[in-house]
Amino acid sequence: MISDSMNQTLTEAALRAQNVFVYYGSTLAVRDVTLDIPKNKITAFIGPSGCGKSTILRCFNRTNDLISGARVEGKITFHGRDLYAKGVDPVEVRRRIGMVFQKPNPFPKSIYENIAFGARINGYQGNMDELVEQSLRSAAIWDEVKDKLKESGLSLSGGQQQRLCIARAIAIEPEIILMDEPCSALDPISTLKVEELMQQLKERYTIVIVTHNMQQASRVSDKTAFFNAEATDKGGKVGYLVEYDDTSTIFSNPKQEYTRDYVSGRFG
Amino acid sequence: MTISSSPPDPSSLWKPNRKASKYVQRVVVWIFGAFALVSVATTFGIIMSLMLETINFFKTVPIWRFLTDTQWTPLFSNPQYGILVLFSATFLTAIIAISVALPLGLFSAIYLSEYAPPQLRKWLKPALEILAGVPTVVFGYFALLLVTPFLQFFIPNLGGFNALSAGLVLGVSITPLVASLSEDAIYAVPESLQKGAYALGCTKREAIVGVILPSALSGIVASCILAISRALGETMIVTLAAGQNPNLTLNPLVPIMTMTAYIVQVSLGDTPAGSIAFLSIFAVGMTLFIITLIFNIFSFWFVRTFREKYE
């Protein structure tokens, strides 16, 4: 019985981090993170600033590679394949594992082109109009923009821009969408829309979200990982994973004292 | 020496001279204002003097003849003033120059901002800017004494004076301008756009061609237009290397005479002041001024219309 459920979680893990250490130059930023990201679920990373939650998120699609001096040790597997093995092309990894950023960053192109660009560079051969409409519908923004597809993506409001960026990420049909504090620059109404959208998207995608907002984590996620930072001898900070469990457990009955203090708002 | 036992009354330590500082303030405003006015007034003075002499010139030579004649023969007994002759030369050298400077400058800018390792960039950028500091007269005899003989090696019928070598060297001389301004424009593209492109599975080249360059387009076009205006008004290189022969031609292999070269020729020569030939340099100067003004206005309009606001 137990081994059966274990097996199931094993096969369902979309991403798996094993003993991951991240360094920036010679500074250790995050130490020894081991966790599984379940498929078709929303996993939230919470924790105080500097605890390494965004750093770990960036390891999953190798965007840490773009930061000079960043180095990842340990093993991160995507359906069992090591993402950091020799010969793995980070460009291909990023195509399969999309990302939405903290600040909406639509390209200074038309709304249509914002969606079509990624598809085109990845060699999409199908009907582009259909793909654009379908992606915008999936991101719950179609009705708001269908009459102005030729207008600049920058003409939209912040919340719309963020949903456009989600649509852009969906358009290249990734399996996983990483979201780095996607709502921190948005107003509450826009935040609500993005959260509703995430619930719809998890049927087709695996979502990992970094958030500062504990209410958001408890509202949207199925699993929650709590990261914390501890001071090092050299005066820096190093992040580590404190506890990782079902969201309901983390927020109602956490095993670690730190987690309890954090989710009850005693620090952070 | 010891500290005095009773400290001085604090209020006596602070005696701002409000009246004097107010007075100084007013004087300072006037001084700065006067200095700012000097540059504006100079510009207006130049335009006024250009205009007055140009009007005098057009009293003798009808403006439509100035614009439509195909000969430029100010020193003949039956002089003709067809600005097209000089304009074709200026236009030709500027076109050659920008077709050298745009690719050179833009590719250097892309390399510098996107590909160059920081150590190399630290050396390359100042080196490029040194090129901008070379006096144009040096470029001029470089074109005349080195580039032309070198080109004659390949093009035997190339004249000793020609638009080709003048244009090529002119292009090199404005390359730093294009490179530096384009690099600023590329550098100003927010990093978040670049990250967004990578997150969609772009390679570096795709990110540059698909996102970064289009986002920097307004700045690149502006740098290009500024470089063209610089090329149009450049004097020493074309005077030295392109010749003094007013030819209505777009053939880059023969000697020509640009507007600026003509102005130099008349200014240095013994043309009597007040004569029509003398007045003609004001009309030519005015034409040059109007052309560059149009370019600058276009560039200003273009940047304002197409600049992206990312916030």
Image (cartoon, coloured by chain):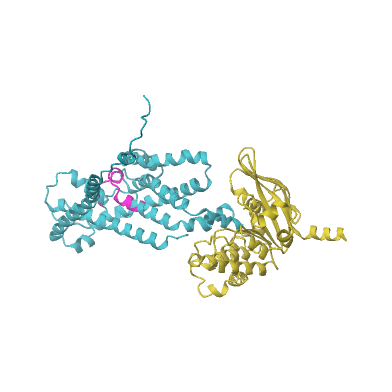
The spot of residue A66 in percent (x, y) is 59, 49
**Residue B20, above or below A129:** above
The spot of residue B107 in percent (x, y) is 47, 49
**Residue B9, above or below B258:** above
Q: Nearest the camera: A189 or A21? A: A189
**Residue A136, above or below A7:** below
The spot of residue B246 in percent (x, y) is 25, 51
Residue in the picture at 19% in, 54% down: B50
Q: Is residue B252 visible?
A: yes
> Could you tell me what secondary structure mostly forms the magenta stretch?
helix
Q: Is residue B39 left or right of residue B203?
A: left
Q: Nearest the camera: A48 or A173? A: A48
Q: Residue B240: within the magenta?
A: yes
Q: Is residue A24 left or right of residue B30?
A: right
Residue furthest front in the image: B6
Asked where in the image residue B4 lies, by quadrant, the reply is top left
Task: Write down which chain is painted cyan.
Answer: B
- Quadrant where the image shows the N terminus of chain A: bottom right
Q: Is residue A115 visible?
A: no
The spot of residue B11 in percent (x, y) is 32, 41
Magenta range = B227-246
Q: Residue A176: within the magenta?
A: no
Task: Write down which chain is painted yellow.
Answer: A
**Residue A26, above or below A96:** above
